[in-house]
Amino acid sequence: MRLLAFRLTSASHQYHFLTGEGFHIKSAAVKDHLVVLSNVLAELRRRQLPSGGWAALLSSAQASLETTCLTTLAIGSQDSDDQRRAQDFLLRVQNPNGSWPAFFGDDQDGAWVTSLAVIALRDFVTAMPARLSAIHWLTKCEGKESNWFWRWKFRTADRHVRFDPDKFGWPWIPHTVSWVVPTAFAILALSQLPCSCGSLEEILIRVDRGIEMLIDRACAGGGWNAGNSVVYVSALAPHPDDTAIALLALGNRTQHPVVQASVEWLEHATPTLTAPWSLSWAILALAAHGRAVESLITSLVALPDLSGNDDTCTLALVCLAADCRRALAALGANL
Amino acid sequence: MILNRRTFLVGTAALAAGASVSVPFFLPKYHSVRRAKRSRVAILHVEQYSQRIDQILASGLRLFRINVQGKTVVLKPNLVDYIPGNAINTHPTLVLAAAESFRRMGAKCVIVAEGPGHQRDTELVLSQSGYRESLRDEALRFVDLNRDELVRTQLRASYMGMKSLWLPRTVLKADFLVSMPKIKAHHWAGVTLSMKNMLGVVPGSRYGWPKNILHWKGIQESILDVSATIPVHFVIADGIVAMEGNGPLNGTARPLGKIVLADDPVAADSVCARLMGFEPDRIVHIREGAKFLGNLSPALIDQLGETLEAPATPFQVVPEFRQLYAL
């Protein structure tokens, strides 16, 4: 039986999951998965802070925007109280310049999580002005190598890291260079735009340039790490999570040789992964590129003591990976 | 020459402008001096990572008058990424031995804490590098500093030109902080030792992976500002198998057979640099750190354990750092 999706109704804690034959339970294995996921979702709800956000670690009380956005996507249903509180929190902590901070209480310059917030608020009509303001910020935010001086420096004096500075994307924080993960999320966020958005042409140019940057930063043999493929003549190895996130952003470039090599690398690397964060991202990316992920989901939910994981961000991601079709739709990744 | 009022005013303004530009270059960039009168460093000979490290380390620590009774001890290893066969990370056997020693010395709590700079999945690095199982077996708590609660912290030096950094609460609240570097050559900083190791506390959740802001502000400058702001109380450096060449990730393993203990990070790094065949005062952050953080001069360092001997063949470095070699 193929599990296509599941839903938890928070009031009764009952699962409604969609199989090829409709909504019901047909196997003990799936039932076990659902019990595990039910526990993880319950744990996520339990960890919601009074502010409406979620902290990155169980030991922390400081709301993290990355964790809050991923958990908002993981919880899913829009009509729950948790969701409304999370949405209110996200709208409340947006910076005056349209960006979002890395965590509640952070400086107001903005951070890469702005893209994640745009994605997390996609289904909330009342969040549209906030999303448009964030999109405006994202189109203005670019890697430092976009400046002619730094491009010149990277072409002439500073050539130990191999990359083409003409192909820039988004930085983790303003005034630094572009990296793979923030660029991939910005591409996903900007690709979800309503067509009526004003500066559409400018956005399309940025998205195309970001895609070129991702292709340029790929490791030899496929896959991505943070964004350094070669340093001091040494080729650096790819990372599963960075590779998966880049592949999500490149869902409509399936025929590109770099994308194909990267999917193959990830497919080869994933079965041995035991870390839930990397395994979850890999499941999402492989599903987005049409690979079978059922056995990987089985491995994921079979990992010991998932709901006891200290890292709330990882818990949210586990839920998203287990319900990967819905998650991919929410992320705006190509299916 | 006739000095009229106008000439006088123009001259005074020019002098003031010149002074405002040049004076900062001559003023110290550190806000306080933490250097002790004398420092102590012990070099221990250890051939390989084995159960014997426990005893060797415990006897080495007894050479120092360390009081961790009732204190929270935070061990900060160097845990960057995992590449099979590469000696990148502080070996977990040494970290466990240190935890065990501090527990026996009466520490209230021992925490292992790190924020890998290259890899976002800390759990993956922990499991691949053998930490996860060891931490679980010894019931040791690990805190991912990349995702820990953050506190805005005023910097106690101004080499980077930043006033503050967001830093993890676990490190700021530590009663006794131990830097546990892997002795490595480093392609941006020359070496990565106990002071450079502290850049791992700068949180990725705020500054990204890698912590790119530190590269833009200057690696040597960042090392100095972070070292000035977060006091390291003790150093246990892993040089049993070190790394030379294109470190911190892609260098070559270099068996050195040493553990270096010290009560002063500058003294520790200067001794480690000498063990690598380098002149420590040619490494910017060690030379500058010796002005306010600790001692570089052998005359101010009590050498315990083995005597310090430079290697017959110095560690290899990338071409930009060949000036580090001792003459």
Image (cartoon, coloured by chain):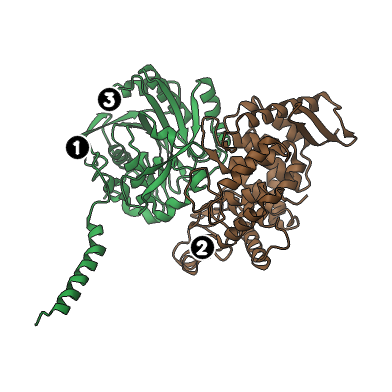
Chain colours: A brown, B green
Q: Residue furthest bottom?
A: B1
Name which quarter of the figure residue B297 lies in: top left
* Front residue of B65 and B317: B65
Disc 3: which residue = B64
Task: Answer with mark 1 or mark 3, whichever residue precedes in sequence.
Answer: 3
Q: Could you tell me which secondary element the residue under label 1 belongs to? A: helix
Q: Residue furthest left?
A: B1
* Front residue of A117 and B219: A117
Give the amino acid type for the residue marked by disc 2 in the picture. Answer: Glu
Q: Is residue B302 above or below residue B108?
A: below
Disc 2: which residue = A145
* Front residue of B3 and B262: B3
Q: Position of residue A275 (x, y in %)?
A: 62, 34
| Label pair 1/3, CB-CB below 8 angstroms | no
Q: Is residue A247 left or right of residue A58?
A: right
Q: Is residue B123 above or below residue B314?
A: above
Q: Could you tell me which secondary element the residue under label 2 belongs to? A: helix
Give the amino acid type for the residue marked by disc 1 in the picture. Answer: Leu
Give the amino acid type for the residue marked by disc 3 in the picture. Answer: Phe
- Of all chains, the one bearing label 3 is B
Q: Residue furthest right?
A: A21
* Front residue of A81 and A321: A81
| Label pair 2/1, CB-CB below 8 angstroms | no
Residue at image coords 36%, 19%:
B70
Q: Is residue A277 above or below residue A27?
A: below
Q: Position of residue A177 (x, y in %)?
A: 51, 57
Disc 1: which residue = B300
| Label pair 3/2, CB-CB below 8 angstroms | no
Q: Is residue A46 left or right of residue A78?
A: left
